[in-house]
Amino acid sequence: MTIAYWCVLLAGLMPILTVSFAKVGGRGDDNHDPRAWLEKQSGFRRRADYAHRNHFEAFPFFAAAVIIAQQVHAAQTPLNILALVFIAARLAYTAFYLTDKPSFRSAVWFVAYLSIVGIFVLAGMAQ
């Protein structure tokens, strides 16, 4: 399995890991209605939930880019590098979200987004 495919797995795990920050140790966590409970949270827990949601939003675009690039036999080394950049940017995004640094968070969100666009460009160049 390629590094890029491993990055898809990591990206798929990020939402679960991020929501754990919102839930672990939370008082009154209600597994019968977890979304309603999360909606009532504030501060760190609220930001963790929002980061969790954003990871789910970013995942399909990233996974599609990697799968398409692999299918058309895009150059593997640049693909792996761009996939790793995406993962690093998303980890930084989470850290900046949790620590309430919105300007940095937006900057690394943009880096992650550009890495996905770069993967699509790489796939386009393979044809």
Image: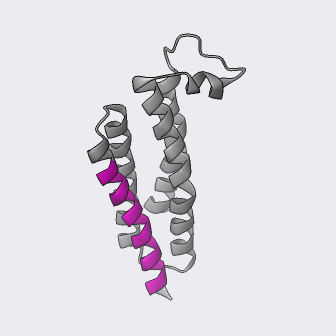
Q: Which residues lie in the magenta part? A: 106-125
Front one among 20 and 103: 103
Within the magenta stretch, is there residue 46?
Answer: no
Residue 100 in view = yes
The location of residue 99, given as percent across then percent down, is 31, 31
Q: Quadrant of residue 112?
A: bottom left
| Count of number-bearing discs | 0
Chief secondary structure of the magenta span?
A: helix
Q: Is residue 77 above or below residue 30?
A: below
Residue 74 in view = no
Kindly give the residue lying farthest to the top in the view shown.
27
The location of residue 60, given as percent across then percent down, is 57, 58
Front one among 113 and 64: 113
- 59 left or right, relative to 103: right
The location of residue 103, given as percent across then percent down, is 27, 46
Within the magenta stretch, is there residue 113?
Answer: yes
